[in-house]
Amino acid sequence: MNGIITPLYAFFVEKLPYVTIFVFLIGTALRLNRWLSAPKDPHGGRLDLVAGLKYIILDVVFFRKTFKTDKMTWLTLFLFHVGAGGILFGHMRGFKLWTAEMFSPLGPWLAEFMVHTLPVYIGWMFIATQVILLIRRGVLERQQLQSLPNDYVALLLLLITTILGQGMRIFPPEAIPTETYSVVFIPRLIVLHLEKVPSFHWFFLHILFTQLFVMYIPFSKLVHIVSGVITPAFYGSRRKEYDL
Amino acid sequence: MTSRDRDEAKEALRKFTRRQLMELDTCAHCALCTEKCPTYAESQVPNYAPGVRSSKTVRLYNKQFDLRARLLGSRPITEEDVADLADSAFNCTLCGRCMETCPFGFQTHELWVRVREVIRDLGGTPSKVLMLEEMLEESQNPYGLEPDMRLDWADYTDLEEIPEKDQADIAYFVGCTTAFKGANHEVAFAIASILNKLKENWTLLGEDEWCCGSPLLLAGDEHGVKKFAEHNVEALKSRGVKTVITGCAGCFRVFKWEYPKLLGYKPDFEVVHAVEFLRDKLASGELNPDPAKERVGYHDPCELARLGGVIDAPREALKYLASDYVELPESGMDVRCCGGGGLLQAVNNDLRMAIVNRRLGQARELGVEILTSGCPSCKLAFADGVRESDIEIEVLDVMELAARQLGLL
Ligand code: SF4
Ligand code: SF4
């Protein structure tokens, strides 16, 4: 590493993660404060765990309602979330939460497919679904919906991050060392282990945008990553209460 | 905007509860609810789309409470802001169908009522809705009619036994739209006749019956409705009533689901919709009607089905009442509103009629000859729709059909 790479490495990898965590935590605290300073529902709104779980599975995992409303959007949303989950899962290997050996029982061909080939397809699928969602939003804008700026910013940030991540996969790495390469974001806490050393340009931009995305979560509708599980649980509880 | 105005705006916006604020912040403005929304579907006006209402509400909230407002001071909420949100919020039948479509399951009925409440505090309630409130205040019904006209339906329909007892097991709560609207008088007659036929120990409340308060709730005046709830519950308690029967979906929902919340306790009587009572009596063999030969369809009133929890009972009752029953499309939990709810008639009757005609068209396509429902507002809406169009469908309440097939009507 030399030239511009060294200072970039120092900033994106060694400094920015602290800023990211700080901004994320502050944003989460502000969001929680916004919600918790609103009055509690004076009329209860009790949570029924079984009914809540049932509708989390039906409506969050399988998008039951979207399936009933619009099959194409259901397919897009479903594949988008499968893509998001798949990519998140893939990244966990880099953080040593699982290893490629996990797939060994499937045989060499299938294991190779699961660990190296499938993620590339999932990356393309994830990008494609985001583009479709972006186009859909643009087409329906001012006709059926009125987006807040953060609706676009969140989607664009994710799209850029994903394209950069996919770029890392498809552009040739600059070197392939025999040993695993480690990127230490926060010593002993967040350490990424790479099999290959990716193209630095794609890699640095990818980690920059990933961190911008993470920082943005609590300030945007991306809060639905958490709240979007809570509200269907209340919906399920209501159905139970009304015996529906 | 003076600092007093700003304080009032803050106070108004603070009415959103934690869950509602979470819902507003979670809304992805995805428009999945839009096409299913009856007011948007018939008008194509973007401002009526539920997701647009959610965006506008959050923008208003953020003017007072977002990070920028905290750091640099709140931005003014203008009259135009409030009028624009009111235009959206009152062009809604409060049917709750958006809840059934929203992937996040937002409880939109309550959310949109809260938006109306906030608009009320910000001085944006449409004048026609305010007039309803005044009439309710003066005459305890939303039509501004004299309370002693509440039992006129019994005279008009020649009901022979009109019980007004001091003590009874069952009270029939007629409801304003049944008692005061001529098109619904036979619904009251049908329910009363069935109760008489069964020799139930039942009573009417007569002038002691006040509006259930539903129009006030729909207008966003939760505070005002409490007086109505207290009065009606007291009138029922003093008569030792064990079961309240109503044929109105709105009264049913308010009695069953809203009164316990408003009063802070569950009144000591059971609340039953007339179709549930009818279903039980048919199933037990106490009533034996001749099934109608015509093709019969049933429209679920939103306040009875999706918002009230009664979906199977009318269908089970209709098995005994009709030999050729057809299920309408978009029914049950997913019912397409008839347009009769949410005070839309007061605000935008043309839109209400467009929604009615869509639903009537669905019934016509199935060859329905008798369209039934379990709500006087639905019946009025369909009757208005039939009158204004060339659709030849007879509109009846399930209870009227029952009384007819029992030879009582
Ligand atoms: S409650 Fe009904 S009319 Fe109102 S926004 Fe939702 S779907 Fe539309
Ligand atoms: S479906 Fe739900 S999340 Fe989507 S715009 Fe409608 S209310 Fe918002």
Image (cartoon, coloured by chain):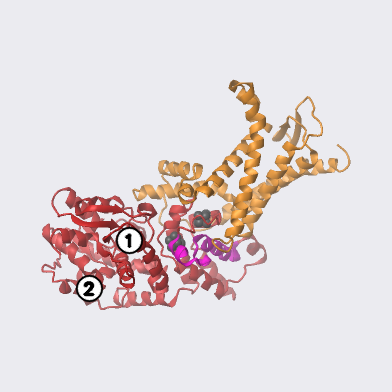
Chain colours: A orange, B red
Left or right of B290 in this view: B17 = right
Tell us which disc is closer to us: 2 or 1: 1
The residue wearing badge 2 is: B150
Quadrant of the drawing holding the N terminus of chain B: bottom right
Label 2 and label 1: CA atoms lie apart by 35 Å
Question: In the rendering, at what x and y percent does residue A135 appear?
Answer: 62, 54
Residue beneath the point at 64% across and 37% down: A121
The residue wearing badge 1 is: B364
The front one of B406 and B294 is B294
Residue beneath the point at 55% across and 63% down: A143
Residues behind callouts 2 and 1 on a single chain: yes
Asked if disc 2 and disc 1 are in contact, CB closer than 8 Å, the reply is no
Question: In the rendering, at what x and y percent does residue B270 appear?
Answer: 25, 55
Q: Amino acid at mark 1?
A: Arg
Earlier along the polypeptide chain: callout 2 or callout 1?
Answer: 2
Question: Ligand 1 is in which quadrant of the figure?
Answer: bottom left
The front one of B407 and A205 is B407
Would residue B107 be visible to someone looking at this image? no
Would residue B139 be visible to someone looking at this image? yes
Q: Which residues are magenta?
A: B37-65
